[in-house]
Image (cartoon, coloured by chain):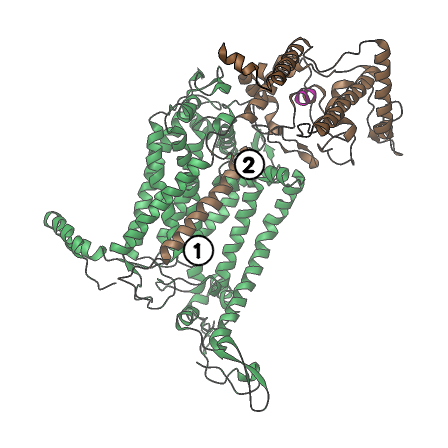
Chain colours: A brown, B green
Amino acid sequence: MKRITAWRRRPWAGYAVVLAALAAIGVIYAGFSPQSDRAEATSSAQAAQDLKNGQQLFNKNCASCHGQNAEGTKDADGKPIAPSLIGVGAASVDFQVSTGRMPAANPGAQIPRKEPIPPFDTSIKTDYEEHEEREAAEKQKARAEKNLRDLNAFIQSLGGGPEVPPASAVDPEKGDVALGGKLFRTNCAQCHSFTGQGGALTGGKYAPPLSGDDVTPTQMYEAMLTGPQAMPVFNDTTLTPKEKQAIIAYLVQTREEPNPGGNGLGRIGPVSEGLAGWLIGIGLLVLAAMWITAKKPKKLKKS
Amino acid sequence: MSDTTAPKAIEGTLGFIDERLGSTTFFRRNVKKVFPDHWSFMLGEIALYSFVILLLTGTFLTLWFQPSMKEVVYDGSYTKLQGVKMSEAYASTLHISFDVRGGLLMRQIHHWAAILFMASILAHMLRVFFTGAYRKPRELNWLIGINMFMIGMLEGLFGYSLPDDLLSGTGLRITQGVLESIPLVGTYGYMFLFGGEFPGQDIIPRLYVLHILLIPGLILGLVTAHMMIMWHQKHTAMPVKNQSEKQVYGYPFYPVFMAKTGAYFLFTFGVTALLGAFAQINPIWLFGPYDPGAISSGSQPDWYMGVLEGALRIMPGWEISAWGHTVSFNVLIPATLPLGIVFGGAMAWPFIEAWITGDKRQHHVNTRPRNAPVRTATGIAAVTFYGLLWLAGANDVLAERFHVSLFATTWFFRVTVILGPIVAFIITKRICLGLQRRDADVIGHGVESGVIMMSPEGGFSERHEAPREEEKIVLLSKENARPEAPARDARGVPAPGAKGPIGHLRSRLSRAWTFDDIPVEEHGHGEHEAIESGSDSQVKH
């Protein structure tokens, strides 16, 4: 008791109590708040305002290719420039925009993943030391999240379609990882390679790597659900939501797993192994051979 | 042969053995065997010592490996595969990797040693080829070496197929396809090897016996023959001072060469252990168990099978069907033709060369590659051919890593695999002749000293100095082309070797071999002064 009394009288004790209380409130709030980070609009007025925001964002960033009413556009020969977005659903928009693929920089064989444009960049850094800087970054991130949500909702309102999965459906900790590995090898590895390192496809297309931390579980789920670009659609009858979660669990847990055998050499199989064998193995042994040959015994030295 | 007598330490041991086996003369002669010294002579030793490491680590692995296709449900330490159905072979490999102390290290050392074994054989073969060390009397050892490489390919394929993982199962699937593509007997051959439909229950136990018993035994026998023949014929030497066709110059086996080669074994062991400890190889737990319904992109074989993989990948889909039978040229040709050309050509080469040049002498001193331009150019053409096919085997990885279209890589390799060797031949031959010209220049004019002389008349000239003696010996090791015997003598009788169409071909090839040879020889004084400076010669001989 004496010790607690002594602690209590320290000059910083008051701050510590306030801090602990704040932390406790935070934890309790997090426990009670819904798992999904989509905050439901409280009233229809708010919803209408969000939808309006979504439409404005669409007009600003997407309409130039996808058309004023998201009906898609064609060039003079009738070849499509951009597809109609009516009915593609929120999941598709969320995937394309959050991975930075949309808005697209230029049409090629395949549109690459890149940093999302600032209004939609939900992956910005917020762990600044400076309080104001951190606050500004957090505000910007919240705005980006809201923008993305509003845009998703706007496209969803046009013709329905697959929705963004809830956080509980993509949690990699809850999936059956052994089943996921099996499903991945049967359905995904032929393009994305054993551990999701990515691979080449025909005509300049490619299966992007899934091994980087920037590929979020939600994006994996949305990609399976909507089949972006060269990827086939794995709808809920082909792969049930449980199976999708299993695949996500396999991918995330495998990429987080350290390599027990040393350096993973890119985890791409025998090509990098052969390269290492020739360059490092034979290279070191040739150096050793040169060193040994250069050594002349003193007693027998002739030349 | 060196004239030094064996030191006391060895005399005692020899005495002990001699009193029991009567082998003094044998040992006395052989312990002093002289070995020439050059770093490239140790490439073959990497293969020898990797083989020793392979035998030792392989024995360790057999203690736990279960060559069985019996289906089991995995229940080991690797949680990501728990509850997955797999063969006992795969499960026991996981057991070695995760539950046997030092098992993963041993597996990795075994696999890296296999990579180094094959790589060093190839490097050694290239050294032997480009220095002309395969010439009479060493043709037999050349043939043994090539056969060891080919048997090594099979040994490797069978070895990495044993764990029954998804990657190696894909390789076995291709093996099955290749067997099936053989006209007439293909299907029977495939059924015989697999004991039924692919993959069946028999293949892993069969490959296991071949991998740990038959093929290592064969390789061991060939290695022994290779070493004994080498010992008997003596090692070839580089053209250095004191070395001649009659006399070997180097260090005696005991104590110098023995210490060096012993140290080199430790180096080889060190490098394989280093790789085994720090570089992950064949992570079968990431590949998953074999399942005929699954496949992964980036499925490549180990490097020594890459040339076959490449040939298969760039081959157009040619196939004919007649009377209910299909001949799959799209599999048959890539499986047999490229390696047939490279290894068949390599095996025939010593005899073709001897036939063309008419050289039936014994050779113990190596040729410098530049001094045999046609041989060197042919070798580089073969390297280019092999190398391009090898790269083509990794075409999807290349396309993915370097962001090029997969189809573009296929077409690139289809074109270059034909044109590349031709271009390589021409360029290499030109480079060789250019180097010959430079050697002739150094011998004829001397080395540029960088000293500028002014003559009394005011003209400038650079002083050339004679090359150092060691360098001169190397340069003068070139055997200049001898004038060809006329195809017909003065009375119109054709020379014995030039009769008939074959003889005609031979004399034409013989001319092609040497017609642009640049003689490297010491000239008399003053021959080149006019070209060099127009003033008094500063050339010293």
Residue B74 lies, with reference to residue B399, above or below; the image says: above
Tag 2–tag 1 contact (CB < 8 Å): no
**The quarter of the displayed image where residue B209 is located:** top left
- What chain letter is assigned to the residue under label 1? B
Residue A72 lies, with reference to residue A239, above or below; the image says: below
Q: Are marks 2 and 1 on the same chain?
A: yes
Q: Is residue A219 magenta?
A: yes
Name the residue carrying label 1.
B129
Residue B411 in the figure: left or right of residue A276: right
List x then y, in percent, for residue A112: 71, 33
Residue B408 lies, with reference to residue A165, above or below; the image says: below
- What chain letter is assigned to the residue under label 2? B
Residue B177 in the figure: left or right of residue B316: left
Q: Amino acid at mark 2?
A: Val
In whole angstroms, how far apart are the C-alphas of marks 2 and 1? 30 Å
Circle 1 crowding by C-alpha within 10 Å: few under 14, some 14–19, many from 20: many
The outermost residue toward the left is: B19
Q: Earlier in the sequence, mark 2 or mark 1?
A: 1
Q: Nearer the viewer, mark 2 or mark 1?
A: 1
Of the numbered discs in the image, which one, if any, rests on residue B331? 2
Residue plotted at (61% across, 52% down): B419
Is residue B374 or residue A219 the one in the foreground? A219
List x then y, in percent, for residue A172: 60, 18
User: Is residue B124 among the parts visible in the rendering?
Assistant: no
Residue A234 in the figure: left or right of residue A193: right
List x then y, in percent, for residue A131: 70, 27
List x then y, in percent, for residue A22: 65, 14
Q: Secondary structure at mark 2?
A: helix
Q: Secondary structure at mark 1?
A: helix
Q: In the rendered structure, which segment of residues is drawn in magenta?
A: A218-222
